[in-house]
């Protein structure tokens, strides 16, 4: 048995000061205040030294880490993110690859997932193949602009299988419902997200019975459908805001470029504490920095000089969210652990509870990660 003592435990909606947490065989067995929970003899003891101990971070949308694409070097990317506190991660594949490339990438990541070093990889976030060709980074390299055809997509659905946790789709594309139905048939537990899209509320809500419950990088790479030239339309962002059952993914960079700080605060007010998900959307692009973005260090730009994901790790996104919105450390752990876990169907992690997986991080008040525990084992 292992015990963490002298900890401020970060619960889903409160803190336990001077807390103690017990874990055994990769599972949290008990926790509480030091005065009410004696430490058994013979335990391995971790002294948190008064720092925060919260659930391991869960990044459901991440393409890379430490300069390594998941599709190319999955173990290097996974280990980099693990060292930064991400104990569960969904490697994300993108629509700028053709079918043969996507199949090769799936095989490479699956092989890495099966190793001990890839233990924090827990499936795929498929930001492919069927987005709206008008939106997204590197969109000139989109080979999926043609008709949606089962001959093209079924090999991908079959290869990724039940490891697909999320499929991102543009609901306005013709025959997208057939793709969604086929993906759902292959994996009934899969979730869908709306992304890289200019769909109407009706087109998005048509797919909600299949399990569409996520707005991919909310307010980024989405269009507008004005009914009249002088009016703002109602499109993807408004639909995500309106529907409580849809989680809003947020890329929270240091300068508030992906999502303006005022918009972050507005989304928080609209969606509430249980429908916000922080993501990194980490990528590896080295395109030119456009005018006005000099000195920006946590955003990528593609070869056309357009924003192309981030260089964030998830604990830094948490820190930025606290800065931009005044969210507490309890709040950001919810956004970066509990909420993403529940959005994609992980019910064994994402919070400190008895019987839950012992995925934990020890950090200071600014989310600087001091220690990482994966399935009860200290990995940092």
Image (cartoon, rainbow, N blue to C red):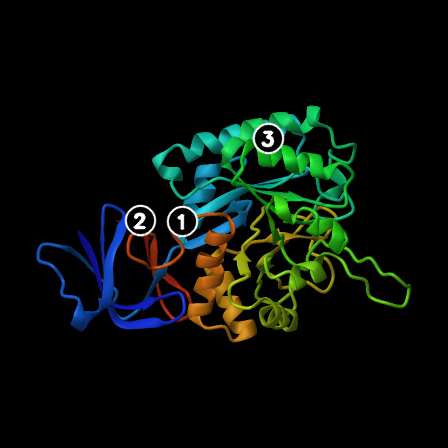
Return the mark for residue 157: 3
Which one is closest to the eye, mark 3 or mark 2?
3
Q: Is mark 3 on a helix, strand or loop?
A: helix
N-terminal-most mark, 2 or 1: 1
Q: Distance between the residues labelled 2 and 1?
A: 8 Å
N-terminal-most mark, 3 or 1: 1
| Local crowd size for mark 1, using a 10 Å CA cut-off: few (<14), some (14–19), many (≥20) | many
3 and 1 marks in contact (CB < 8 Å)? no
Q: In the displayed image of the protein, which residue is found farthest to the right?
A: 229
Q: In which quarter of the image is residue 290?
A: bottom right
Q: Name the residue under label 2.
A: 379
Q: In the displayed image of the protein, which residue is found farthest to the bottom?
A: 326
2 and 1 marks in contact (CB < 8 Å)? yes
Which one is closest to the eye, mark 3 or mark 1?
3
Q: Position of residue 43 (x, y in %)?
A: 13, 55
Q: Distance between the residues labelled 3 and 2?
A: 33 Å
| Vertical side of 142 occupied by 6: above or below | below
N-terminal-most mark, 3 or 2: 3
Task: Please state the total of marks drawn on the protein image.
Answer: 3
Q: In the displayed image of the protein, which residue is found farthest to the front?
A: 209
Q: In the displayed image of the protein, which residue is found farthest to the left?
A: 41
Q: Where is residue 229 in the image (x, y as percent from the top left)?
A: 91, 64
| Vertical side of 125 occupied by 258: above or below | below
Q: Nearer the viewer, residue 158 or 203?
A: 203
| Vertical side of 301 occupied by 363: above or below | below
Residue 309 seen anywhere in this rendered image of the structure: yes
Q: Where is residue 75 in the image (x, y as percent from the top left)?
A: 44, 38
Image side of residue 309 versus residue 108, left or right: right
| Local crowd size for mark 2, using a 10 Å CA cut-off: few (<14), some (14–19), many (≥20) | some
Q: Mark 1 points at which residue?
A: 82
Q: Position of residue 275 (x, y in %)?
A: 55, 61
């Amino acid at each position: 048995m292992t015990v963490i003592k002298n900890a401020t435990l970060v619960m889903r909606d409160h803190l336990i000061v001077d807390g103690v947490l017990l874990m055994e065989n990769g599972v949290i067995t008990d926790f509480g205040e030091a005065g009410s929970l004696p430490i058994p003899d013979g335990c391995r003891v971790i002294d948190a030294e008064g720092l925060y101990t919260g659930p391991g971070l869960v990044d459901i949308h991440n393409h890379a880490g430490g300069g390594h694409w998941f599709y190319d070097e999955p173990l290097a990317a996974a280990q980099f993110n693990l060292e930064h506190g991400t104990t569960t991660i969904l490697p994300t594949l993108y629509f700028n690859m053709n079918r043969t490339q996507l199949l090769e990438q799936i095989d490479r990541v699956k092989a890495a997932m099966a190793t001990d070093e890839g233990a924090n990889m827990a499936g795929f976030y498929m930001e492919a193949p069927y987005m709206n060709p008008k939106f997204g980074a590197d969109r000139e390299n989109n080979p999926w602009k043609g008709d949606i055809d089962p001959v093209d997509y079924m090999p991908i659905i079959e290869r990724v299988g039940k490891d697909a946790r999320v499929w991102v789709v543009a609901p306005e594309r013709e025959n997208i419902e057939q793709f969604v139905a086929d993906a759902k048939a292959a994996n009934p537990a899969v979730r869908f997200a709306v992304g890289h899209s200019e769909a109407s509320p009706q087109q998005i809500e048509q797919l909600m019975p299949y399990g569409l419950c996520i707005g991919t990088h909310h307010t980024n790479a989405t269009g507008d459908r004005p009914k009249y030239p002088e009016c703002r339309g109602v499109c993807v962002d408004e639909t995500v805001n309106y529907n409580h059952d849809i989680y809003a993914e947020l890329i929270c960079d240091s300068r508030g470029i992906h999502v303006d700080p005022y918009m972050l605060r507005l989304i928080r007010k609209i969606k509430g504490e249980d429908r916000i998900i922080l993501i990194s959307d980490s990528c590896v692009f080295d395109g030119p920095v456009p005018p006005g973005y000099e000195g920006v260090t946590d955003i990528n730009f593609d070869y056309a000089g357009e924003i192309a994901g981030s260089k964030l790790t998830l604990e830094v996104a948490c820190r930025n969210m606290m800065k931009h919105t005044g969210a507490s450390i309890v709040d950001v752990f919810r956004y970066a652990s509990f909420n993403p876990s529940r959005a994609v169907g992980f019910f064994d992690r994402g919070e400190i509870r008895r019987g839950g997986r012992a995925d934990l991080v020890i950090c200071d008040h600014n989310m600087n990660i001091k220690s990482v525990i994966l399935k009860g084992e200290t990995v940092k």
